[in-house]
Image (spheres, rainbow, N blue to C red):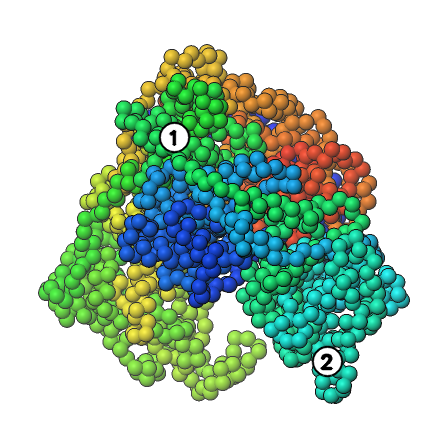
Amino acid sequence: MKRASPHWSPEGTRATMKTIKKSNTQEKDFIFRSPFKPQQQAQNIQTCLESIHRDLEYIQYHGYDEFTKRRATYLDDDADAATKDNENLGSAFNGTLRDYQQFMLERAKKRNTIVHLGTGMGKTLIAIMLIKEFLGCAIKGNVAAGGTKSQILFLVPSIALAVQHTDSLRANLPCKVETACHTSSRSARARESIAAADVVVATHGSALDLLNHYQDILSLTDVSLLVIDECHYATGDHNYATILRKYYHPLKEGKRQRPRILGLTASPLINVSIRTNEEKLQSLLSEFESIMDSRLVGFPSDHKLGNSSFSNVEQKVVGYESREIVILPNQGNWKLHWSRKNEINQLQYLCNEVGLRVTAAYVSKLAREVSRNEFDQETSQQCENLKSYLIYVENHLNELIAQDKAGPYGGHTDKMRKLECLLTTVLKEGSGSMEQTPVGIVFVKQRITAIALCNYFRIVGNEQARSIDEETRAQKPDSDNHTNKLNECTDESNVFEDAENDNSMDFTAFHKNNAQTILHVPEKGHAARNSAMFRCDFVVRRATHIFKYMNKANSLDKHQLEELEDDWLHQMEDIRSIIGKLRLRETNVLFATSIVEEGVDVEACSFVISFDALQNVKSFIQMKGRARQKDARFFVFADSGINKQHLTLENASSVETMVYRFIAKREVEYIREFNSSRDNFKSCLLGDEEAAMHRELYTTSMSSVDLSSSKSLLNRYSLSVPIDPSNRTSKQAISLHMPLYKDHSLVLPTHIPPDMRVINLPSLFNGESRKKKHSLMALAACVRLHRLGLLNDRLLPLSDADMKSWLIENALNDIPPCEVIPLRSSETPRKSTPIVVYLYKLTQYGKIFNEEENSFSSGDDKKFRLALASLSPLPDDFPILSYHHSELGCIECNVSFVGHEQLSEYQWDRLTDFHCVVFNARWRRKSKPRWFSFDDDLLTKHRNPYVIGCLDSNDEVHWRFIDSIINDFSRSEDSRKKAVRSYDSKLISPRVCCPIYNPTTAYILYEASGKKSEDEFATSEFKSFREYYATKYALKINPQGKMFRARRIWEFPQSSNTSDAKPQAKRIPFIDIPQELCSESIVADPLLILHLIVLPQLLYKLERFLTVLSLIKHATSNYPTLGKCLSTIPVDSITEALTAKSCCEATSYDRLEWLGDAVLKLLHTDALLKWKRTSFLHEGYLSLLRSAMGSNERLCNCAKITGIADFILLAPLTRAEWKPCGLRHLTRAVVEDDDNVRLMKPSDKVCADVIESLIGIIFLHHGIHSSMSVACELGISFNYGDADDTVTWSDLSVDSKLIDFAASFLGVERFQSPQLLVEATTHQSCLHKPVPSYQRLEWIGDAVLCLAIREWLFRFDAKLAVPRLVVLEATLECNESLAFLGFKEGLCKFIDHRDSRLPNRFENFQRDLEKMERGLWCTGKNAGLSARYFCFSPTYVSPSQVHFRFFSPIDPPKVISDVVEALLGAAHVDLGFAQGQKAALHVIRPILQSICSLTVSSDPSWNVRGILHPKQHLYQMTGGIVRVRAYKGDKFRGLGIPWFCSEGNKDNEGYIGVVSCKGLTIAAVWESSSRAAINVSCSLAVDLLAANPHILDKLRDFHLISKKYP
């Protein structure tokens, strides 16, 4: 094979390989050395084996479930991300506004207004009425009221409020209302709905995102009314304030520019304390109004509703004494799952909070409802242990209560006692009717407290209802005794005293009288429930996650589910239903967490209880605001034992009153006018960047950026650049890729070209503050990035889709479609008479084949040859087709042109009938008889239509023989049987027959053997032939019947493949067959059968050959460069490039596709590098563009548009997939299937792979330049070459030592542009240099090295499959290999950097290399320190059993491998492709030498252990049943696995690499770096499994068995 390129030839590659094989370097033994010494390795393996056997034995006797309790599993903490339930509280308003509501509405119609009203006083109603007004004006086009703007924006602080307000607006407004939450900006469908809505209810975050990046969807210029709920948040950096500052204030004042603002708040100034003076209040309020551009409107001080709006709720403190009642039983001995510890701690908290009685009642339900924690892999046994523990806790608590050891209050805490008496007293007041029943909310801090209290009071209420129901049925006059007893036990006057007097209250009698009755299980009954004093419910977040999990389906069967449907505690109804029952007073007490503090309105609520101390003023206002009834009451529980509360009720009320009075007496009104003079700044003479700095704003067609967002946008761009993950590991590492701010300049990241990297601040702004100068420069940077195309018109960083669309639009041309070439005939042969056919003789020969042929043809009149009758001329240079048959040996076939002949329609029919007969005899499925028939229409679907004919010795059509075969085929079954009966003792010629007892097997009958059926059988098992057939087949034959000498027909091969090993052909023995049990075959001529044996295989190969020739012809006509290249490549090589794996051939396109992928990668790299519109981009973006150019989608389109997809070889040689030309099955049900099989379509992936394989084979035979020409011709690459190659820092001096080192390291003589070496060795931390960092050249060098490695491996061993090639490639180009090569030559001395971490890493790594005591996979620092090898298992081992010492590394500095690739990139750019490839092979020569020396073996399937990367080798060996993971030293001690070593790392430094299989540890190694820990542990596991293959079998069995376990 020769290539056209004069600079880079295969001979050069082979010469390089020969030189490599002559290695005598000192390092080659080191490169793939085992990490352990032989004696140490043997001891390590033995210890691992003992551990594995011990664990497997433990599993065998105790089970996998028990084993999982002991195994090591590192689990991250799963934060409970609770979300609020959405409630629909919307209802239509049909009444009239109150006077103060009307007053505020009128003010809001005229100006921007902040409505300050207490909770429940109609703020939302005012908003609805104003929205109605603006909607009506917008429809009428009333500019005075709302202008012609189309949308109204309603901002809310939470999703729950967004849903509630959406429901309210939809119930009251005849318009389209949509909700915008956090997912709206990510969904195109949601954005379309938002754009079409009349009213948009949005959370502040989603609104800001839409305004930032989707102003075509949502813009304040299109908003007529802006409603801001809970507008007191509009301060500081809150999104409310950001939206107003960034998008509202810059708009021009006037009715057609700025939208009207309506703010809603109950507490406009919440960040105040009791010490805040009036001056401070004025300052805060002025700032608030300035941001809102609105005037706050509330009640004047003399308004009749002014005081009542904030003081109509009576407020009381309930004091209590806190003490710990009892410690719950220890859970340590119960073998509970680790996740249950924190859950059970909640029970201790609950017990301390409410006492034993409530806790016991809750634990009783909990034990019934808890189910297995499948997420955290809790076992069934552990779950049962938990239930047993809970039952034990319940019994223990009840026992303490029964023994009167539960404290002074009968099992309650003082806090719980006060709560029960308080609820009893409050609810007793309205016991007359349902309409008068008080309704209240009890707020608690913990979810478990709310559920436990609800459970307890439900039990109390159900017991009350049961007693009342029984008394009612008995019609006893003392039916109210139970209630009277409760009333006697309470004293209302005591409850409402202040906290100081609460200590003297006596609640003992109540609990003593009810201690034995309140825990009975209640009966069902709706009426009874409504008669109870306590009708409770609860609202918490994720009630089923208090204990994971409370799933009924996991705990109960279907019958139990139906029975306990209404009595299941840990389930929460829809919040709409809960609030609805509260409004209807079906529920009178709601226990809730902060989920209903804000946004849930219950008009019927008459009291609110805060079971815990107040946290802040906002919570106080919101909780108190839930009480909407007249004379409502608000109770706060306070611990009397704490002298100083965090926030007392008195202080909270004082702050609220102070703010109200300040607002009420305000009389001065102002509206801040925003100065927009800078909008009128005349910037027509200034550049875009300076103009944006003057205006403090930059606007595109779809977005804008100002000073408040410029820095965040610049940071967002910098973080979006696809950099290496290792550069994101620390703040210091990521800072190198972030903008650098100086006093009067801004330096952009190093991937920006040097002439575009620096932003200079104009002197006009030198007097501004430091913060503003930074923002101005960041704004100019955003303008520059947008102008460069690095930010899109939405001012967002480019996404993958953006890059791809930009590339296709600006760089890649449309793929040129091919011209229509009539490769297939459009007409059937019958439409042209006479029919011209081209005859090609198929001459088969072989040693055994010729012997068999001569035994059947004694005269020339009996000799014939099969022929190919083609409807179109075929090429002259046919290859010799061959096939190795197991019984006939090697059979070869020569295809030669005989001539053409004109056939009549009758002759054509006879020829096609013969074609059918031939393949019905050879290719028909005999197990499921499906006969072939000929269809002329199918010939039009074949690229080279043909039929099989027969030629006589004069090379003319043998019509007589054809007619005889057709006549034999048309005989009936009886005729074929009679033909056998007519045989004489001596046959004229042998015939092919089939036994009637086995019609699928054919025999050649030669002559009568002279034996009869009654003669002795061949074996002693049967006396005669007659007995044999009677016994085995139940057939009776004539005792005097003739026996014929016969031989089984030759095997019919079913595939095109033959094994590489060709054993000697087997001779078929002769047997005796009764004449009367035979019937002639449909084709009885054995000579014809002989010629049909391998006919399908020969035709299959012939069709593949013709397909390749058709592709060459097609390419030559449409794509001359491709056609010219293919025409000089051997057909077999092109056949390999077109053969898909579905063909099941010995070779497919896999290897060529693997090579072609690297060729395309380098072609695309060069194309992007040489185009001026992409040469300056960051290598991350260049990688995205390169991926888009070589994407499967693009390559697939190329294959389809160019027509190459039609030539892909897909069908294997099987009866189901391949059918001879023109044939279809007679069964109509499968006709369509036959056509589909014949016209198999390649998948998109196969199409893309074939394009890559063609590029690969062109590269192998014609070089890189032809590959580039073909890629450009097919439209999968481009070659503009218009980039400026001039180095902008050409005046920079280059150290001669660097030049000499690079020449020696790369194996080159000179450099044309030595300045590239400076770029290749410049770290990204060198922001001071005018030279870009090595990242661009490293990106180029990666492609250069990839192609060099793949071509070398491709030529090194033609038998290597792609999976092994991929692993070898990973070994050659991994970080360890390249770092070793760089350090070996002293590359670290020439790297220019400003990273303080690198010198120490270089020094330690260099010291490790000098020792060379361990292999390549263990290179790193601390080479002289001791480390540990661990073999740990869930079963205990004595520490003395495991103690090894070896050297411990760190990860090789990645900067070294990056600079190595950068130097290769520099050689490629400066010296060209050939020198770049030569340099790449020169650099990796030591590793190639080691591979050559280690693979010299007599075994053709040479052993690659030690060469392959340990992790890749382990995965390949085990088939993915193992897991490899590295743990930090401090985390390792918390794994829960006993680790065994007499000495340890006291500082928890380093990493532990663990190889395990479903929790069973195979090997573990302690190293000081994660990469080395993984490599060494994998190396140890590979050696262990290679030396003990039975262990791998056991692990596979163990993996299958353990799959059924969690």
Kindly identify the amino acid type of the residue bearing the numbered disc 1: Glu
**Most distant residue in the left direction:** 833
Task: Count the marks.
Answer: 2
Q: Residue at x 34, y 80 (%)?
A: 980
For the question of whether residue 1471 can be seen, the reply is: yes
Where does the image place residue 810, in percent across and percent down from the top left?
28, 37
* Inter-mark Cα distance, 1 to 2: 76 Å
Residues 535 and 1456: in front is 535
Where does the image place residue 1054, in percent across and percent down from the top left?
40, 62
Residues 1498 and 1469: in front is 1469
Kindly identify the amino acid type of the residue bearing the numbered disc 2: Ile
Q: Are marks 1 and 2 in contact (CB under 8 Å)?
A: no
Q: Residue at x 76, y 86 (%)?
A: 477
Observer-side mark, 1 or 2, equals 2
Return the mark for residue 468. Answer: 2
Quarter in which the C terminus is drawn: bottom right
Where does the image place residue 842, in percent across and percent down from the top left?
26, 57
Give above or below for 594 relative to 857: above
Which quadrant of the structure image shows residue 1548?
top right
Residues 722 and 741: in front is 741
Q: Which residue is mark 1?
A: 696
Q: Earlier in the sequence, mark 1 or mark 2?
A: 2
Residue 460 placement, left or right of 291? right
Where does the image place residue 80, in percent across and percent down from the top left?
62, 52
Q: Residue at x 16, y 69 (%)?
A: 907
